[in-house]
Image (spheres, grey):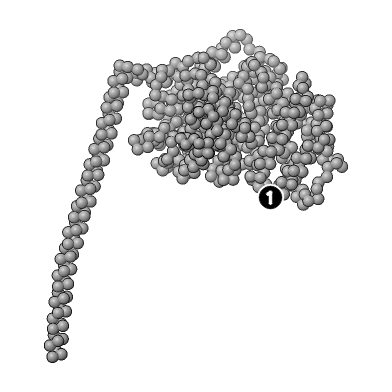
């Protein structure tokens, strides 16, 4: 059990404030970028931000900041708040005459930047406390903040917080990070032993040896340890792991449980940092990810911004064409970091656009993603879409031109169902009632001879063995399942492979027959197409002949009419001549 701590003890003061200063400058730069892109406060923004920066960097504030932290033992965020507030109340604080007309906007930006810096300082202290821990631990915090999930170390096993203003948000993030979370107001002692059971929602304080062994065995039924091989044989079934950070990258890379990562959700870097990640930071993250994953497949989703995973500094936004146009620089920076890391490591990457609601959006995202990669002289990037909206679900036949698809059942069920959400423990019958036969038809559409688009099925319900088995038997071959639950479907996959054979004998015969059937089907399709073309040509020739016949008939009639007219004209002319004579 490790407690959150903001007090500066046993930490070298100079080193601490150097790190805080680096974060201050980074935050200021990122905040300035956001303000420019969103055009907050219009023409005054540059002068406002310049004034704020030099105010925050005043020697008096810096001196009192250090004094409150070191001598009076304030935590860093409160120390900064106190130092800034006192300075702004003093006679030294003077607003330039040119900014008096926008004082309200000035105060707004001072407050915003102050709160963001306080949050960054708290996270710095937490990072310094836990980043070098070399044993498994549970983090104990007073109040849950999503910023605490930024750059979590590998050894963290769970989080206990005494309170959370937004409980739903807290558990949503814990789920995505695959960490058990408990909200429990209890006076835990630092370094005490605790078991956090996220399956049955239990906390065991100072567990016995028997209890420890029991829960290790229980955990082993859900996930695996590094070095532990899977029980299922090699097959054409591909299992991918969704990821939000790099904590489990090595576990996925060096085992035979997963084919790769799908999807890697980049938006959580933006959301948990509380500020725009720099190009350098993004490049390093992707470089490290691509390096460790080696020959494993990687599907990266561009930031999927939405209200349920807020990015306060960007406001309430959704990833769509309008948002891209508004914050183009930020999206392009993200794509460029991925492309540069891909080129540096030689790793081929699959890029993914989220929340596609209209088929016309596919070409929009393909253009911008491919442009970023072509800028790095990479011309073969594969671009796919998240298939997770009600419109895509209903009008799937309009969706073409993508290289692959990830069918996101979590979002899809919330769009089409009034009874279930992404966390519902659905039965097989309930799943069939909600998704069938549409999902089966979508599968047939994507696997059709004309399209042949790889489609990965992703969602929480896949950890239900009966549901997973149904999808297997229905012909689905690619799945995204959380690594913390992969063992729940191991038995189903083993049995599926064994009943179909994997190497020789029955399996080889079956594959040969399947190949023959496929060849025959292709030849049959070819004959049918040729017959269809032949019939069409014959029909066209008949049509041409008929039209010629009609034209010829018309020609004969026309000639007869002309002869009659000419004959009449000739007779008339003769009569006229006779009359003249």
Picture coordinates of residue 41 (x, y %)? 69, 48
From the viewer's perspective, is 479 left or right of 544? Answer: right
From the viewer's perspective, is 360 left or right of 63? Answer: left
Vertically, is 543 above or below 486?
below
Location of residue 8 by image quarter: top right
Picture coordinates of residue 352 (x, y %)? 50, 35
Picture coordinates of residue 67 (x, y %)? 83, 28
Q: Residues within 10 Å of mark 1 (few under 14, many from 20)?
A: few
What is the secondary structure assignment of the residue under circle 1?
helix
Between 88 and 282, the residue placed more toward the observer is 282
What residue is disc 1 on?
42
Residue 3 in view = yes
Tell me the residue at 27%/28% (across/down). Answer: 517
From the viewer's perspective, is 481 left or right of 557? Answer: right
Vertically, is 204 above or below 470?
above
From the viewer's perspective, is 59 left or right of 165? Answer: right
Q: Quadrant of the N terminus?
A: top right
Residue 271 in view = no
Between 402 and 459, the residue placed more toward the observer is 402
Tell me the residue at 50%/23% (across/down). Answer: 294
């Amino acid at each position: 059990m490790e407690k959150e701590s903001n007090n500066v003890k046993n930490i070298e003061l100079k080193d601490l404030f150097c790190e805080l200063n680096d974060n201050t400058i980074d935050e200021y730069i990122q905040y300035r970028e956001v303000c420019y892109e969103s055009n907050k406060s219009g023409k005054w923004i540059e002068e406002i931000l310049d004034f704020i920066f030099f105010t925050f960097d005043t020697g008096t504030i810096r001196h009192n900041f250090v004094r409150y932290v070191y001598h009076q033992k304030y935590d860093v965020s409160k120390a900064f708040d106190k130092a800034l507030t006192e300075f702004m109340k003093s006679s030294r604080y003077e607003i330039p005459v040119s900014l008096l007309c926008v004082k309200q906007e000035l105060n707004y930006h001072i407050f915003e930047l102050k709160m963001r810096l306080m949050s960054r300082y708290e996270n710095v202290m937490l990072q310094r406390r836990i980043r070098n821990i070399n044993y498994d631990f549970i983090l104990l915090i007073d109040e849950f903040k999503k910023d605490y999930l930024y750059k979590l170390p590998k050894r963290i096993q769970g989080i206990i917080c005494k309170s959370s203003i937004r409980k739903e948000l807290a558990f949503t993030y814990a789920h995505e990070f695959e960490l058990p979370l408990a909200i429990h107001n209890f006076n835990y002692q630092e370094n005490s032993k605790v078991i956090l059971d996220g399956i049955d929602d239990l906390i065991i304080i100072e567990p016995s040896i028997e209890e420890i062994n029991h829960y290790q065995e229980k955990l082993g039924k859900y996930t695996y340890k590094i070095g532990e091989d899977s029980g299922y044989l090699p097959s054409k079934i591909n299992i991918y792991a969704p990821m939000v950070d790099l904590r489990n990258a090595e576990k996925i890379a060096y085992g035979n449980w997963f084919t790769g990562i799908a999807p890697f959700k980049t938006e959580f870097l933006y959301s948990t940092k509380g500020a725009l990640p720099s190009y350098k930071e993004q490049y390093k993250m992707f470089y490290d990810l691509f390096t460790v994953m080696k020959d494993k497949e990687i599907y990266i989703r561009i930031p999927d911004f939405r209200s349920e995973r807020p990015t306060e500094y960007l406001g309430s936004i959704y990833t769509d064409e309008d948002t891209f146009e508004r914050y183009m620089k930020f999206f392009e920076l993200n794509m460029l970091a991925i492309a540069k890391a891909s080129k540096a490591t030689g790793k081929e990457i699959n890029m993914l656009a989220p929340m596609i609601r209209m088929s016309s959006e596919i070409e929009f995202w393909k253009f911008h993603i491919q442009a970023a990669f072509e800028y790095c002289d990479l011309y073969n990037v594969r671009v796919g879409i998240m298939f997770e909206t009600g419109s895509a679900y209903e009008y799937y036949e309009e969706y073409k031109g993508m290289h692959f698809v990830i069918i996101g059942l979590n979002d899809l069920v919330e769009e089409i169902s009034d009874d279930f959400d992404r966390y519902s423990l659905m039965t097989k019958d309930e799943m069939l009632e909600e998704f069938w036969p549409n999902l089966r038809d979508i599968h047939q559409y994507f696997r059709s001879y004309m399209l042949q688009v790889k489609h990965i099925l992703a969602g929480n319900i896949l950890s239900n063995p009966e549901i997973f088995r149904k999808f297997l038997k229905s012909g689905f071959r690619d799945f995204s399942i959380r690594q913390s639950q992969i063992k729940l479907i191991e038995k189903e996959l083993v049995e599926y492979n064994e009943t179909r054979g994997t190497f020789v004998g029955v399996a080889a015969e079956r594959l040969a027959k399947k190949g023959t059937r496929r060849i025959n089907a292709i030849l049959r399709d070819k004959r049918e197409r040729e017959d269809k073309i032949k019939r069409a040509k014959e029909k066209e020739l008949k049509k041409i002949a008929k039209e010629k016949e009609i034209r010829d008939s018309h020609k004969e009639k026309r000639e007869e009419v002309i002869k009659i007219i000419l004959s009449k004209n000739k007779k008339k002319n003769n009569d006229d001549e006779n009359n003249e004579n």
